[in-house]
Amino acid sequence: MSSNKKENAENRAVAYVRVSSQRQVDEGVSIAAQTRRIKDYAHFKGLSLADNDIFVDEGISGGVPLWQRPQGGAMHRRMLRENIPHLISLKIDRMFRMVSDALITVDELSSEGFTLHVVDLHGEPVDTSSPTGRFFLTILAAMAEMERGLISERTQMGMDYLRATQKKFTRAIYGWNVTNDGSLVPNWNEHNVIDYMRWMLSLGVTASSIAKDLNKQGVRGKLGGKWYGSSVLNTIRNDFHQQRKKYTKPHNWGEKEWHDAVPW
């Protein structure tokens, strides 16, 4: 191998990008934003990063181990197959949620001769090419996990209070409308669909079949999307629907055989 080819191989990198929700896109961690900053970093460090070596997982939770994600796994296989020595990601939480996952993966990468680069770790770039870099990465990953846990705890407390006082506690709930003062009130047309879904499921119809039936009838989700088996089950299993017992039902409620047919 010529010296130029060897140098190019040693400087070759892959990159990992992940978004799990529209909220993250709105907050500036969109695919385009992450990719742009990663490319700038690679250029600054003299690393060779081709477009087809950037792996993107959309709608994937950070709780799924990196190598078990569709694109995360494909990236790892390419790194091993083509001996690509550098892995770049914008932030540590794009790859890991738990410190244990970060520790295991960093040790695994180091043992295989790979270097992990994090472009923005609390405002500073860091890589695992040195023991100091690995040390700071693991310490800051632990701090990030603790911070997420505290935020999640406070968020859950707030949501529990809003639920208990019949106030809006999430973006949209099928079966409920939000009033001007933020209160949640039943949408009886949607509750008719909820009862229908629960009734069909009690008869042994699968959630996927129920979703296909609703889509065929032109029934849409709260935000206008199609139904899937998972969204049918999530809607049926939402305990908040039991709050409708506090409200007076429409005069024609009970005309359909599925109305209140399945006990909560």
Image: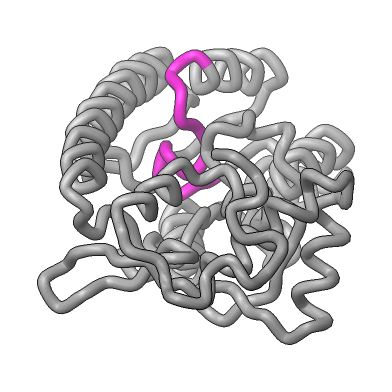
Magenta stretch holds residue 129: no
- 234 over 223 or under it: above or below: above
- Image quarter where the N terminus lies is top right
On the question of residue 140 being in view, the answer is yes
Q: Residue furthest left?
A: 181
- 224 on left or right of 52: left
Q: Residue at x 58, y 68 (%)?
A: 192
Quadrant of the image for the C terminus?
top right
User: Which residue sits furthest bottom?
Assistant: 218
In x, y percent, where is residue 246?
Answer: 30, 52
Q: Is residue 166 above or below residue 252?
A: above
Residue at x 42% of width, y 39% of height: 93
Which of 261/136 is in front?
261
Give the residues drawn in magenta, as a range. Answer: 88-100
Q: Where is residue 229, by image quadrant? A: bottom right
Q: Is residue 91 magenta?
A: yes
Q: Nearer the viewer, residue 214 or 96?
A: 214
Above-or-below relation of 4 to 66: below
Q: Residue at x 43, y 18 (%)?
A: 99
Front residue (pair 152, 220): 220
Taking the image as drawn, is residue 55 in sight?
no
Where is residue 184 shown, x and y percent of the image? 27, 63
Residue 258 lies, in percent from the top left, at: 69, 60
Q: Is residue 131 left or right of residue 95?
A: left
* Colour option used: one colour
Does 40 sit left or right of 189 as displayed? left
| Above or below 136: residue 176 | below
217, 171: nearer the viewer: 217
Residue shown at the point (52%, 77%) measured from the top left:
252
How far from the left and from the top, in percent, is residue 171?
35, 64
